[in-house]
Amino acid sequence: MRFLIEPLVPAAQCRSWVEQLQRAGEAWRPGTDTAGWHAREVKANHQLDRQCALHQTLAAELLDQLRRHPLIQAAAFPRQIHGLLFSRSGVGEGYGRHVDNAWMAGGRSDLSFTIALSDPDGYQGGALVLESPSGEDAFRLPAGHALVYPSTLLHRVEPVTAGERLVAVGWIESRIRHGDQRELLFELDTARRTLFERSGKDEVFDLISRSYTNLLRRWER
């Protein structure tokens, strides 16, 4: 299951972050520094040095927003949100077809996320393309919007043809390892919340809540 957060980061905050990132200068490092041995052949971007003060400041702010967002909690069941990177792609840069590593330095990658920081009117190309059995879907998100998707998918970032693309990316290790189980739990939780809004805490609500809670006990790792 994939889902959009529209938006995650307010527009004014995005503009401030973009201005700071554009002034980061030598803090930008080749993206190949963090690529796996096979991904180095297709990765052509730059990433903010994780050790620099700007990365630590912006990452802390962004992680706080991710952890507090109700849709992240309800649909992703995060144990850890980790590996946060700030990525810059200029003309001719992108990231070819690849799948994310199963394990990152911060934990297992069950879900990946991309958060757009620059406005899509400020660059051309640079679409995030997800592959699935039903075909390909391309995304050029508005600034501040986030896409969360299964880390199991093959995906790529098309080369930027004009301007500059700035995004934040990272991964979620879920307490519920399997995607089909997360989706079922999310649907049950959505149903019981809708029922509570309509009818309050009645017998049907209690039965659905019991099933939801007991499935969590069974599936949580």
Image: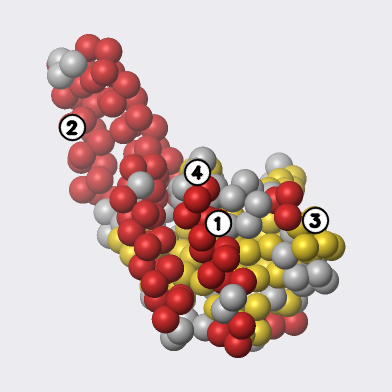
Q: Which residue is mark 3?
A: 124
Q: Which residue is mark 2?
A: 210
Q: Label 4, label 3: how many angstroms apart (C-alpha)?
A: 21 Å
Whichever of callouts 3 and 2 sits on the residue coming sooner in the sequence is: 3
Q: Label 3, label 2: how many angstroms apart (C-alpha)?
A: 49 Å
Sort mark 4 into few (<14), some (14-19) or many (20+) by Cα contacts within 10 Å.
Answer: some
Indicate the amino acid at tag 3: Gln
Indicate the amino acid at tag 4: Pro
- Residue 205 is situated, as x and y percent measured from the top left of the image, at 21, 21
Kind of element beneath mark 1: helix
Whichever of callouts 3 and 1 sits on the residue coming sooner in the sequence is: 1
Indicate the amino acid at tag 1: Arg
Whichever of callouts 4 and 3 sits on the residue coming sooner in the sequence is: 4
Residue 98 in sight from this viewpoint: yes
Kind of element beneath mark 2: helix
- Residue 201 is situated, as x and y percent measured from the top left of the image, at 15, 19
Residue 154 in sight from this viewpoint: no
Q: Residue at x 56, y 71 (%)?
A: 21
Q: Residue at x 35, y 29 (%)?
A: 190
Q: Label 4, label 2: how many angstroms apart (C-alpha)?
A: 32 Å
Mark 3 or mark 1, which is nearer to you? Answer: 1
Whichever of callouts 2 and 1 sits on the residue coming sooner in the sequence is: 1
Mark 3 or mark 2, which is nearer to you? Answer: 3
- Residue 108 is situated, as x and y percent measured from the top left of the image, at 42, 69
Q: Quadrant of residue 168?
A: bottom right
Q: Which residue is mark 1?
A: 15
Q: Label 2, label 1: how many angstroms apart (C-alpha)?
A: 45 Å
Sort mark 3 into few (<14), some (14-19) or many (20+) by Cα contacts within 10 Å.
Answer: some
Q: Residue at x 47, y 54 (%)?
A: 13
